[in-house]
Amino acid sequence: MTYCQCYHRNSGYRRNSDANIRNLQRLASLSGDPRDYRAFLQARSRAGLCCNLTGWNAPLMVGLGPERCPCQMKPSLAAATSWRSPPRERIDELFPPELLEAQRDRWLRIGLATGPTDIELAQAGIRLAYETAGLPTEGLQFIWLPNPKEGAERAVELILNKKAGSQVWLQIKNQVDKQVWNQATNQVRHQVWNQVINQVYNQVGSQVWNQVFNQARNQQVCWGSHDASNLSFYDLFSYAGIRAADALRGLSWAAQATGWWWPFEKAVIVTERPTSITPTQIIYPGGWVVNR
């Protein structure tokens, strides 16, 4: 009998045998009760069988990146890249409108996401970003904080203590820009930017910088989910076969998993996404509320 383990945020480590899952599936089939079917799906998810132990579900259409599996198993880089198109030097044809729309909608969901951090994906993405930038990850300390305000304040403390920040975003982005930026349309980027920036980024950013900017002027912050505009653009080309855009995969994973984060030489400050976004407020854990 084969067992596999999967970390589930709310219930810790659990084990489910193949036989038990088959029994639950048989019971759900015979009873027709939705509750039995949900029990089967939950057991399969906890065992990692929902995504074949990769942490990813297949993309909704060809040309898109994969969707994160709800089981939140440790993500597989090989699986995440297996849906890419064959490599190419440049793109001369227009993307299908339906692909652009699907990419826009996918990254709008990421940019406007609320709820707790996907810890496995956040750590994997940030480590991958460091490695891509040629920065060491051994001994890297993750500092988890509830909102960007507290994250910025802690970043100031690290700077004042002479712990220099690493320019992770700029190092990776500069490697990609010259090879990707001028090769095709920026339609997706503009569509995502307008909605995400107007709805969230401007309000959150203005309050953080108004309160701590004078001390944090030299910080290098990565916007996490609120960088959906830039990352949606590069993600589209990555899965279309432009391998240079793969350099941003770590930042893309982090955006799908968490909020703002600050990279330093031996530590990373990571903050949560909002708990809710309403027409009048953006509410974060820790009691921080941004009035819109």
Image (tube, rainbow, N blue to C red):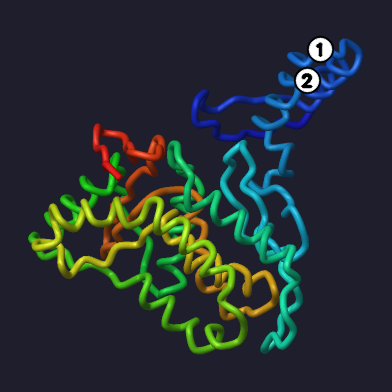
Local secondary structure at mark 2: helix
Answer left or right for 260 relative to 58.
left
Looking at the picture, how far across and down is residue 230, in whole percent?
A: 47, 69
Instruction: Say above or below: 71 vs 11.
Output: below
Disc marking residue 37? 2
**Disc 2 residue type?**
Tyr
Residue 97 against residue 59 in the figure, above or below: below
Instruction: Kindly identify which residue carries mark 1.
Output: 33
**Which residue is nearer to you in this view: 168 or 183?**
183
Q: Please tell me which residue lies in front, 142 or 204.
A: 204
Whether 247 is drawn above or below 15: the answer is below
Q: Which quadrant would the N terminus be assigned to in this image?
A: top right
Please report the residue visible at 64 percent of the width from the left and 25 percent of the height from the top: 15
Q: Which quarter of the figure is the C terminus placed in?
A: top left
Where does the image place residue 193, in percent across and percent down from the top left? 47, 64
The residue lying toward the viewer, choosing from 113 and 245, is 113
